[in-house]
Amino acid sequence: MTFDDLLPSGWTAADAVFALAWAATFFAIVAIWVPLLERRPSSRRAAAIRQRRSDLLTKAREPKRRGLGNQGIGFAKKVVQRLELLGSGQHETAKLKMLRAGKRSKDAVVLFLFMKLTMPIILGGITALLLYGTGFYPMPPIIKLVVCVTMIMVGFYAPEIYARNAADKRKAALEKAMPDVMDLLVISVEAGLNLDSALVRVAREIRLSCPELADELELTAVELGFLQERREALKNLEIRTDLPSVTALVGTLGQAEKYGTPLAQSLRVLAAEMRSDRLMKAEEKAAKLPATLTVPMVIFIMPSLFIVLIGPGILRTVDALGNL
């Protein structure tokens, strides 16, 4: 059997070669044209990444509302907007306090300003009603005035005290977890991850032990890709946490990015310093322990010890004197 026998009737070898050449050309054109139908896939990929980062940032900052709290927030927002407190300098100060207390939503700032505005009126009014209106407890007029003024001051400073206590507790939790975070960052960077991926990975690992710091790292990772200046994202992390260790971390990251110094080596040195500081603080607390226990020992332990040791002798002496 020859090649001519395989051809259809009326076809020659030249016709077969021409048909094969035409088919090869057609499939080559199709293979080149089909990928070009996807116009600028890199731009679509970049747009998808920007949308994802925007969604993560919105989710991280969105308020957590439950039940019928929306109505109360709406009323507080109307009062604050009517008094134009959102555009004042107090708004920025309250926003910074709420950020450091772990409250990122706008509703938290509105509620803080509303409580700071209404609590002196409420506490002062209730106290004045009880003292002057109902005669709940008879006292001189000057004492009543002092009590009312005191309750007004308590209502004014109560939101401030709450925000400060929440910020202090959060700062203590962040400070406690920072050495472990530094060690995990060193491991992640030495494994080949960039800064954004390393922050996300570390946040995932410490989610159970310190969710506050995990939230801060995830938000920083989002802002690193979302903001135009990466230094601004690191500066926001420093402002939100207000920790010396985070300030040192931000300075190290900024120096590594600006001058091109090895990031893993810088983080390793900083992690060792944080471990040393943590050990020194523990030793300092241990050294203060004897002096701290002196007062409870004198007040609670020494009288009981004296009663147990000297009590029987005193009783025998009393009995002997009674027999005389």
Image (cartoon, grey):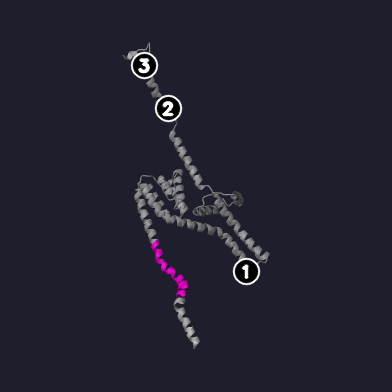
Counting from the top left corner in percent of width and height, residue 218 is at 45, 47
**In whole angstroms, how far apart are the C-alphas of marks 3 and 1?**
113 Å
| Mark 1 Cα shell of 10 Å, populated few (<14), some (14-19), many (≥20) | few
Amino acid residing under circle 2 = Val
Residue that label 2 marks: 34
Based on the displayed image, in which of its 4 quarters is residue 15 positioned? Answer: top left
Left or right of 134? Residue 268 is left
Q: Indicate which disc, 3 or 1, sits on the residue closer to the N terminus.
A: 3
Counting from the top left corner in percent of width and height, residue 269 is at 35, 53
Dot 2: what SS?
Answer: helix
Tell whether label 2 touches label 1 (CB within 8 Å): no
Q: Indicate which disc, 1 or 2, sits on the residue closer to the N terminus.
A: 2
* Label number found at residue 118: none
Find out whether residue 99 is within the magenta segment.
no
Q: Indicate which disc, 2 or 3, sits on the residue closer to the N terminus.
A: 3
* Label number found at residue 143: 1
Dot 3: what SS?
Answer: helix
From the image, state whether disc 3 or disc 1 is nearer to you: 3
Residue that label 3 marks: 18
Residue drawn at x 59%, y 64% as measured from the top left: 150
Residue drawn at x 37%, y 58% as measured from the top left: 276
| Mark 2 Cα shell of 10 Å, populated few (<14), some (14-19), many (≥20) | few
Based on the displayed image, in which of its 4 quarters is residue 192 positioned? Answer: top left
Residues in magenta?
282-305
Q: Quadrant of the N terminus?
A: top left
**In whole angstroms, how far apart are the C-alphas of marks 2 and 3?**
24 Å
Residue toward you, 314 or 47: 314
